[in-house]
Amino acid sequence: MDEPSMPTSPAGTTPPPPPSSPPGPPTPPIPLAELLASKDLGLRRIAGPAEAELLWVHTSEMADPYPYLLGGELLLSAGVLLTDPDHYVGRLVEAGAAALGFGVRPVHETVPGALIEACDRQGLPLLEVPPETPFTAIARAVWRLMAEARHRELRRVTRAQQALATAAARPDPVPAVLHQLATQLGGRAVLLTARGEEVHAAGRRLPPEPAGALTRLARVVARQRPGSPASATDTHGDTHLSAYALGGGDGLVLALAAGRRESGDHTVAGIAVVLLSLLAAPHQGADAAGRSAALVRMLLGATPAEVAPLLGSTGPWTVIHARRTDGTPADALTAGALGASLGTALVDAGRGAGEAVRLLLPLPGAAAGPLPGMAPEDEAARPPQEDGAARPPQEADTIAPQPGWTLGASAPTPVTALDAADSLAARALAHAQATRAPLTVDAPVSGLAALVPPEEAAAHARALLAPLTAPLADTLRCWLSLHGSWDRTAVALGVHRNTVRQRIGRCGELLDADLDDMDVRAELWFALRQG
């Protein structure tokens, strides 16, 4: 058998269930009919429905393989421990298995009749595997079919991407992209406002009831309240519905309806969401002409404060650093999709492999006055304070974790201090990666620390930390923010844990302080937050 030996469960007990939401495979599902069409395998369906979709292949001779199934498997077995076919099939159906392949000989000369009846009764496809067909040959055939399906999907997505990009270059890009998207998906594509008003549409018109259901689904993702999902799906009869929120502040939504749903549809729709988010930016206040003017003026010597109004906001601003959770580099389209989800077109994804994506996010509806706790005369000169500790952001309805991304964000900052905020966002991202948090937000100084005049606090910090070099101070700051964890600090800084130990030991020597003392740590943390 394939699974490790496990203790036998006491009578009457039930093994632990498999995960309720297993991760999906990286390839499209394979119809059972395609596998049965492989004549060289000699497989024959002898019970159960004719239609099923295979996600995996698994071989097991366990009396109850339920705990080891994820769902969607073609389970292969010779029935070595089969004693109660009805219970066995019931457990497979409960685990979400797609089909059962039963190998005849040497254990059973034929497929047991009780097993055939149980599969028919409980709706599980049952395949007879002839003696000359090894189970590994079946697994190899399924993987081959999956590879072919994946290749077909990638070719389809590539063609769709090229077609959508060509449409985006037309003089009427938004209607052209919608028309091409409707053609690719074989359905209806509509751009709606948050109130359900149609801006543009393409493809065959829907009957009133599915059209109403699509409008209601679009309102679910319209960004009018905190926590709105980025996408949603539904069905109405035989019509598959989906809705995607576009980036920006007016809640534009791409709504799709199609009579069929094919592998790759979600990817094609995602490409269209990125393009439409950029193309619709003028309707959402992110004026492309203004951004170009800001860039030109910066190149010609204007200050950030002078060009900020051209970007649609006078501040405060939040700097965000982002990396893909799985470690893969982010291309321009992927970074653009992140910017669209966060509601900004100010995205920097071209700094080279291994570098974080950087985004500049104006806070909507921010007052033109100073930040909380800041005197008006100090607003332009005072940089943001740092805090490596993970805390919920003050603007929780503005910045939300994004699936597949790890984010680090600065506290809201005036435009004159964006360079300091950029460093704080980088530290927040390192903290998020070390703690495996989807989002870490820098927070301004508050509480008792805020009662000390900034000038006196900065002078004390300079004197206390004078013996430390910049790398040592950064290491100490990171180590304290992670509660003295050697491993997490090493992950955050990208160095070996022994290097962290050596640096912290050196800090203790230079400062002539016991870094295990909580009072010492508190004073150093206060000082490090000033610089």
Image (spheres, rainbow, N blue to C red):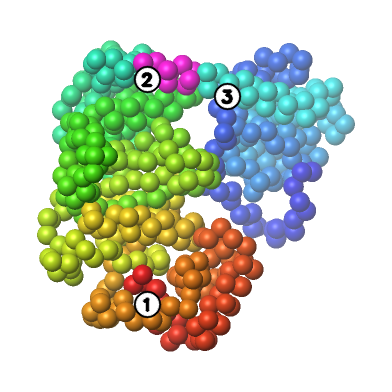
Measured as percent of width and height from the top left, residue 180 is found at 34, 15
Residue 46 in the figure: left or right of residue 123:
right
Residue linked to disc 1: 462
Residue linked to disc 3: 150
Depth check, front residue: 500 or 167: 500
Q: Quadrant of the N terminus?
A: top right
Residue under the point 37% across and 20% down: 165
Q: Where does the magenta region start and end? A: 156-166
Residue 313 in the figure: left or right of residue 103:
left
Sequence-wise, which precedes: disc 1 or disc 3? 3
- What secondary structure is found at the residue carrying circle 1? helix
Sequence-wise, which precedes: disc 2 or disc 3? 3
Kindly give the residue lying farthest to the right in the view shown: 106
Residue type at the position of mark 3: Arg
Residue under the point 27% across and 63% down: 383
Q: Is residue 295 above or below residue 461?
A: above
> Does residue 163 belong to the magenta stretch?
yes
Sequence-wise, which precedes: disc 1 or disc 2? 2
Asked whether the viewer can see residue 165, the reply is: yes
- Principal SS element in the magenta part? helix
Depth check, front residue: 411 or 394: 411
Measured as percent of width and height from the top left, residue 149 is found at 58, 21
Residue type at the position of mark 2: Ala
Name the mark on residue 165. 2
Residue 214 in the figure: left or right of residue 128:
left
Cα gap from disc 2 to disc 3, whole angstroms: 22 Å
Mark 1 surroundings: few (<14), some (14-19) or many (≥20) residues within 10 A:
some
Quadrant housing residue 130: top right
Residue under the point 74% across and 55% down: 6
